[in-house]
Amino acid sequence: MGLTRPLPGEYAEGYAPYFTTAPEGDPLLLLQAQMGEVVDLFTGLSEAQGAYRYAPGKWSLKDLIQHLSDAERIFDYRCLRIGRGDATPLPGFDENAYALAARADDRPIAALLGDFHAAREASLALFYSLPEAVWGQQGTTNGRPLTARCIPYICLGHVAHHLNVIRERYLPGLK
């Protein structure tokens, strides 16, 4: 599959940071490698470290892992709908409401990582299953246009963004 980086007209400007953050290369191979990067980053953290917040009102590291899984599943659903030619506009989601409802701090890090691994594996299975002809199909998500081809890059850039935040704001506080 020769998935190429989407052009600016294929997505609304609000998605641009994800494309900037997504590394160059085959997005599906990069998604596979990134899954290992997430697991490596969180494996070995204690449960207390997983509950760490770098500031009051910020998500814990466990909340962040859960958010990565939740967002991945939502992005996949969007890709499935667009890839199957469903033009029904898809709503956005309130990530803070999801984080509150998920109660990630009550779950072990290993379970949260297993959940992320399962979500990413499902993403890859979906992306590999889509015929090349559907990648250019356009849908509407959160009131903004988006082609199916954008979604693997959004998954990649979204996780890369959060990994950067974790390294810059969370990990220094754990030392």
Image: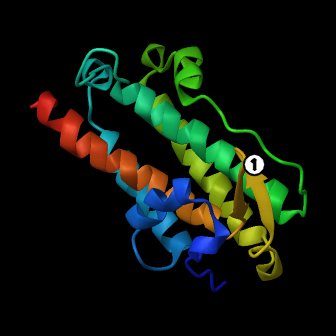
Quick check: 2 left or right of 111? right
> The N terminus lies in which quarter of the figure?
bottom right
- Count of residue discs: 1
Q: On the rendered image, what quadrant is the C terminus found in? A: top left
Scheme of colours in the image:
rainbow
Q: Residue 120: horizontal and vertical position, in percent?
A: 58, 52
Residue drawn at x 41%, y 77% is 24
Q: Is residue 22 above or below residue 161?
A: below
The residue at the far left in this view is 175
Q: Residue furthest bottom?
A: 2
Q: Residue at x 27, y 21 (%)?
A: 52
SS at mark 1?
helix
131 over 75 or under it: above or below: below
Say which quarter of the image contains residue 43: top left
Left or right position of 127 against 28:
right
Q: Is residue 153 left or right of residue 127?
A: left
Q: Position of residue 21 (x, y in %)?
A: 39, 62
What's the residue at 77%, 81% (across, down)?
132
Q: Residue 54 at x, y = what percent?
A: 23, 25
Indicate the quadrant where residue 5 lies: bottom right
| Residue 144 visible here | yes
Q: Is residue 29 above or below residue 64?
A: below
Q: Residue 82 location, x and y as percent?
A: 81, 60
Q: Is residue 109 visible?
A: no
Mark 1, Cα crowd under 10 Å, few <14 / some 14-19 / many 20+, is: some
The residue identified by callout 1 is 77
Q: Which three-letter amino acid code belongs to the residue tagged 1?
A: Tyr
